[in-house]
């Protein structure tokens, strides 16, 4: 199945929600690629459309939402408009998703082994014993001690971090080509988060699985990803290699976001100094003004910004949607 | 620290002296009968906070850090007077809070206010902003009814809210604005000490920066002292003068912020700092701490961290390490320092 090209190519994806109050452009003309074994960080604040982007790839958008334009090429096959039976075969087999809340993945009234064996047998013709062996191996791979006994446990008998590992183990079961991880460590403690990040890195390195890591935490992405896409109000405003974007952000929003993170940050005023703050708040997608969605909070906005900015490539390997990118510091 | 020097300088704003909090799950009737009949049932006791002593000097920001279940919120609630300690003494400006009565007790209670994590759960959805913020100062006679409106305008402006919003209800505000309402409610009774319990954890990154900046402005303008509880080490490093690290109900390390982040002494602090994602560390190889946080219902004997500690020795499994001053101003509870 694997082709020479990138595992996933998303082009011009638009997912809109047709609500009674009006049309919400949750994802509006989003394009990116993820290569084999690559971890791509998809970063944004609440309501920026990062989760809906993940759902759109998996065909999980429910009415009143609909993918209205664009294509999602997975190993060369367009997933948009794919029939439900084919999609079902891909989901949980070639593409898996990890949610922020592991209880969205786990059924609270079924034992772990029941759920894992079902996942294997839904996609492969193997007998019960073989499915069980695969389940046990997957639990072992994500660092769950004594996997044989833990298979017989119910979800409530695990701690939060362990539950998230089980969810990850289920995602790994069929060795997918792509994993979409939606804030999988946000609810976890620092030491447990470190363990999960370690497993994610190992997995992509060893099995060539591509991963989209959706998060609001720039620091997590900094340590994990090779590439980063920054979303704001349904659009990717800046994307590129992780070092380039974090060290020399050119979109005013990316700059503001990085400046807002305290500590170990070249842009903050040192300990106890004032943090850079983006004025105002994230706009409602319902009443989005035409033009650049960031313009009302942007220090560089002028009349030109009343028109939708197109994607430009001001630096090698960088895509930006802005009329006034920060390029002055170019040396 | 005696009652005599209650108003003098050098008396900490808040001091806890070997404070403990135990939550006991008392047996119901059926379980009591079962025990009479010889069944093996015991009361479950959680030692949420175990003989913790901290000092917060006036004007200082102390960061209290730890993972879930370490007791940091319970300690914060005891300091704020919401929970009563099971053991130990909490002194406000040198005076035992439990021994104060009447007017003095009320004043001390007003002087220490708390900001909560969830800006949705901590505001009464059926009250208007004016009532949420104005109820306490009116009741306690800080302002008269005639001046209340002007006073509210002043408090709301101070936290960056438009006073025109005061007739609105909480659901009409965003998360960041609600957190500002919570801060205004605390400030309205003119406190000297704020306990912030994960006060920015629920907010978006760009809004976190706005609220952190507000806390720092308020500290300067109103001469406030903070106990800043958070699991986010980057935030704590940014805002605190001193940092206290807790693990399963006990303090494992306490030191000035620079010293603690430059040279963490306790193996748990070292592991915690190593695990924090940082903007300037790219494609790093995470080396996770092994194991899980044990249940506070059945904490391991000896040093609570020993099952996960890479340096654990036989002694760590039996003897609880005392919190000792390792270098001036740096306290740590680890047997390794005795070597």
Image (cartoon, grey):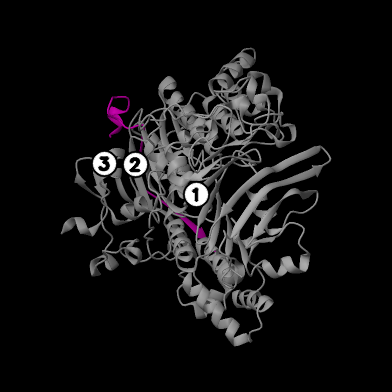
Q: Of A177 and A117, which appears nearest the observer?
A: A177
Foreground disc of the pair 3, 1: 1
Q: Of A117 and A191, which appears nearest the observer?
A: A117
Tell me if label 2 and label 1 are in contact, CB under 8 Å: no
Q: At which x and y percent is residue B66?
A: 41, 50
Same chain, labels 2 and 1: no
**B220 relative to A30 in the view: left or right:** left
Disc 1 on helix, strand or loop? strand
Q: Of B84 and B209, which appears nearest the observer?
A: B209
| Residue drawn at point x = 43 percent, y = 64 percent | B292
Give me the C-alpha separation between circle 2 and circle 1: 34 Å
In the image, residue B6 lies in the stretch drawn in magenta: yes
Tell me if label 2 and label 3 are in contact, CB under 8 Å: no
- Residue holding disc 2: B243
How crowded pointer 2 is (Cα within 10 Å; few <14, some 14-19, many 20+) is rated as: many
Disc 3 on helix, strand or loop? helix
Give me the C-alpha separation between circle 3 and circle 1: 34 Å
Please provide the residue range marked out in magenta.
B1-26
Disc 2 on helix, strand or loop? strand
Foreground disc of the pair 2, 1: 1
Q: At which x and y percent is residue A195?
A: 43, 61
Same chain, labels 2 and 3: yes
Does residue B40 appear in the picture of this structure?
A: no
Eyeballing the image, is B125 above or below A126?
above
- Residue holding disc 1: A227
The quarter of the rendered structure image containing the C terminus of chain B is bottom left
């Amino acid at each position: 199945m694997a082709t020479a090209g990138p595992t996933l190519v998303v082009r011009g994806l638009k997912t809109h929600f047709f609500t009674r109050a009006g049309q919400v452009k949750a994802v509006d003309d989003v394009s990116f690629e993820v290569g084999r074994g690559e971890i791509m960080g998809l970063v944004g604040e609440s309501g920026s459309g990062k989760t809906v982007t993940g759902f759109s790839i998996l065909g999980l958008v429910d009415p009143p939402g609909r993918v209205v334009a664009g294509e999602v090429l997975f190993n060369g096959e367009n997933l948009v408009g794919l029939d439900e039976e084919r999609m079902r075969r891909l989901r949980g087999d070639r593409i898996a998703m990890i949610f922020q809340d592991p209880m969205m993945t786990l059924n609270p009234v079924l034992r772990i082994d029941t759920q894992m064996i079902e996942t294997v047998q839904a996609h492969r013709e193997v007998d019960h014993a073989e499915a069980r062996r695969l389940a046990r191996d997957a639990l072992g791979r994500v660092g769950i001690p004594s996997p044989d006994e833990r298979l017989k446990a119910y979800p409530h008998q695990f701690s939060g971090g362990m539950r998230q590992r089980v969810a990850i183990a289920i995602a790994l079961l069929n060795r997918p080509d792509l994993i979409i991880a939606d804030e999988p460590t946000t609810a976890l403690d620092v030491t447990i988060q470190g363990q999960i990040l370690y497993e994610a890195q190992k997995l992509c390195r060893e099995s060539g699985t591509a991963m989209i890591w959706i998060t609001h935490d720039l620091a997590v992405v900094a340590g994990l990803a090779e590439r980063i896409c920054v979303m704001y109000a349904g659009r990717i405003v800046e994307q590129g290699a992780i070092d380039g974007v974090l060290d020399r952000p050119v979109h005013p929003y990316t700059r503001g976001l990085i400046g807002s993170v305290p500590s170990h940050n070249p842009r903050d005023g040192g300990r106890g100094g004032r943090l850079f703050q983006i004025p105002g708040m994230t706009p409602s997608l319902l009443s989005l003004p035409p033009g650049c969605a960031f313009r009302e909070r942007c220090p560089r906005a002028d009349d030109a910004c009343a028109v939708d900015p197109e994607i430009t490539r001001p630096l090698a390997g960088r895509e930006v949607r802005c009329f006034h990118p920060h390029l002055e510091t170019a040396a | 620290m005696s009652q005599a020097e209650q108003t003098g300088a050098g008396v900490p704003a808040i001091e806890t002296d070997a404070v403990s909090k135990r939550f006991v799950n008392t047996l119901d009737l059926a379980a009591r009968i079962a025990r009479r009949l010889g069944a093996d049932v015991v009361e479950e006791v959680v030692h949420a906070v175990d003989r913790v002593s901290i000092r917060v000097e006036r004007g200082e920001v102390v960061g209290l850090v730890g993972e879930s279940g370490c007791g940091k919120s319970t300690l914060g609630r005891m300091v704020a007077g919401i929970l009563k300690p099971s053991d130990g003494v909490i002194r406000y400006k040198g005076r035992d809070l439990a021994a104060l009565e009447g007017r003095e007790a009320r004043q001390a209670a007003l002087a220490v206010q708390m900001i909560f994590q969830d800006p949705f759960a901590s505001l009464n959805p059926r009250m208007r902003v004016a009532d949420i913020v104005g109820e306490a100062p009116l009741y306690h006679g800080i302002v008269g009814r005639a001046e209340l409106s002007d006073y509210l305008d002043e408090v709301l402006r101070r936290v960056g809210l438009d006073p025109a919003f005061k007739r609105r209800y909480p659901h009409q505000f965003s998360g960041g604005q609600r957190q500002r309402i919570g801060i205004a409610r605390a400030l309205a009774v003119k406190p000297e000490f704020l306990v912030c319990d994960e006060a920015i954890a629920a907010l978006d990154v760009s809004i976190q920066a706005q609220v952190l900046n507000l806390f720092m402005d308020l500290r300067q303008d109103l001469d406030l002292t903070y106990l800043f509880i958070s699991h986010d080490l980057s935030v704590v490093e940014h805002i605190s003068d001193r940092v206290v690290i807790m693990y399963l109900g006990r303090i494992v390390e306490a030191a000035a912020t620079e010293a603690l982040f430059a040279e963490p002494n306790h193996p748990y602090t070292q592991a915690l700092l190593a695990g924090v994602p940082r903007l300037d560390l790219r494609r790093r190889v995470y080396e996770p701490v092994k194991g899980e946080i044990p249940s506070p219902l059945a904490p391991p004997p000896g040093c609570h961290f020993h099952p996960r500690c890479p340096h654990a020795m036989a002694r760590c499994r039996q003897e609880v390490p005392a919190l000792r001053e390792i270098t001036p101003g740096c306290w740590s509870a680890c047997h390794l320092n005795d070597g």
